[in-house]
Image (spheres, rainbow, N blue to C red):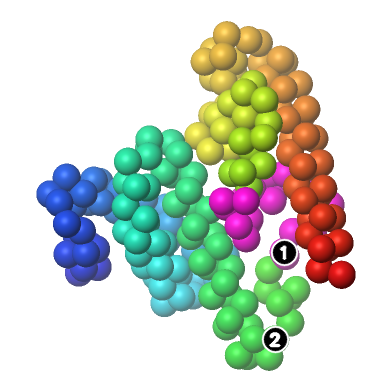
Amino acid sequence: MVLLGLYLSMLETEQERRRMSEIYYAHQKTCLFVAKSILQDDVWLAEDAVHNTFLAIIKKKELLELPDYRLRALILAIVKRRAIDLLRHKIRHKSENIDDMISIPSSEDSVEVTISTSEDFERLTEHLQRLNESYRSVLQLKYFSDLPNAKIGEYLGITSRQVEILLYNAKLRLRKSLNDANSDDRRGAL
């Protein structure tokens, strides 16, 4: 409750304060759960990850205007990133091996893992924007809104099987786009 007061004091308008209160109450517990699962129930670090997440949202006030389903996906991505960063920092200072604590996705991991633990949510969003509308929509509904295939099919006016096929093809194209970008980055670093 004290932190919410801090967050609200950082905002200028009553509308921003009201929206931030809604966001805080809607996502604080989920963020804490996600952070604790990554940080092996280290409550103090998990609370830091959640705090840093809400501060990041306040710094970019335009995020307050996002629709709830997009904001939820963004908040979860930020809290995961913050928790992983804190875990890495903790491990570095304890001189323990990070592989014993958490598995970091490799380039061969699934798109789902890449999305959930992405180091750079904005870069992922950029690659999503490159996909055609049907692929982008089905991925956003599935992974950002956590909808089952049947519900996605209802929204898009297609069958569950067609949703599965779209998801499969969309993940292939997104994976290729990400891998191509990583290859380009590695070549540029040489």
Up-down relation of residue 156 to residue 128 (above or below)? above
* Kind of residue sitting beneath label 1: Ile
Measured as percent of width and height from the top left, residue 97 is found at 74, 82
Badge 2 is on which residue?
A: 96
Residue 13 in picture, x, y percent from top left:
15, 51
Span highlighted in magenta in the image = 103-123
Q: Tell me if residue 29 comes above or below residue 159 in the rendering.
A: below
Q: Which residue is rendered at x = 42% and y = 43% of the image?
A: 71
Q: Is residue 114 magenta?
A: yes
Residue drawn at (21%, 68%) of the image: 6
Along the viewing direction, whichever of 62 and 113 lies nearer the viewer = 62
Residue 113 lies left or right of residue 187; in this view the side is: left
User: Which circle marks residue 148 in the picture?
Assistant: none
Instruction: Name the residue located 48 percent from the left edge and 48 percent from the top edge.
Output: 74
Residue at the farthest left position: 14
Residue 37 in view here: no
Q: Quadrant of the N terminus?
A: bottom left
